[in-house]
Image: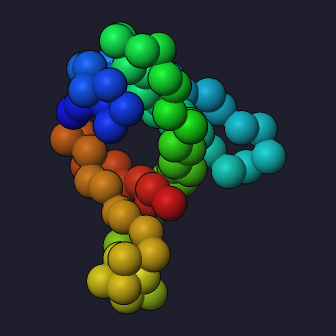
Amino acid sequence: MRCPRCGGPLQTFASGRFVRSGEGWVRVVRQVCSGCGLEWPDLSLRCTPVQEFTPSLKGLQGSGDLIVVRHPDGTLEVVS
């Protein structure tokens, strides 16, 4: 990706932190232009583990309200 201001390349930094309020992991992604130093706002994604893929989760995923991720070890996680 390129910076819309100067055309320089964007560097992406991702980090995660655990929220104790029961909301699970919060992944924070930010991008910084290496040319002009412009920093884009944080994109925070809430990740919550789920036991099974229910019809209600399928409906919410179909409408684009959330994403259900199946990890290689078989665990499911809702990203919103």
| Nearer to the camera, 14 or 47 | 14
Query: Residue visible at 44% across and 87% down?
Result: 56
Residue 70's spot in the image, x, y percent? 27, 53
Q: Vertically, is 2 above or below 63?
A: above
Q: Residue furthest right?
A: 21
Query: Residue visible at 38% across and 19% down?
Result: 33
Residue 46 appears anywhere in the view? yes
Residue 52's spot in the image, x, y percent? 39, 68
Query: Residue visible at 43% across and 69% down?
Result: 66
Q: Vertically, is 40 above or below 48?
A: above
Q: Vertically, is 67 above or below 18?
A: below
Q: Is residue 50 left or right of residue 34?
A: right
Q: Is residue 58 left or right of residue 20?
A: left
Where residue 72 sits, quadrant-wise, is top left
Query: Residue visible at 33% across and 19% down?
Result: 11
Question: How many numbered marks have been drawn onto this rendered protein structure?
Answer: 0
Residue 57's spot in the image, x, y percent? 42, 79
Quadrant (top left/top right/bottom left/bottom right) for the N terminus: top left
Where residue 5 sits, quadrant-wise, is top left
Residue 76's spot in the image, x, y percent? 36, 55
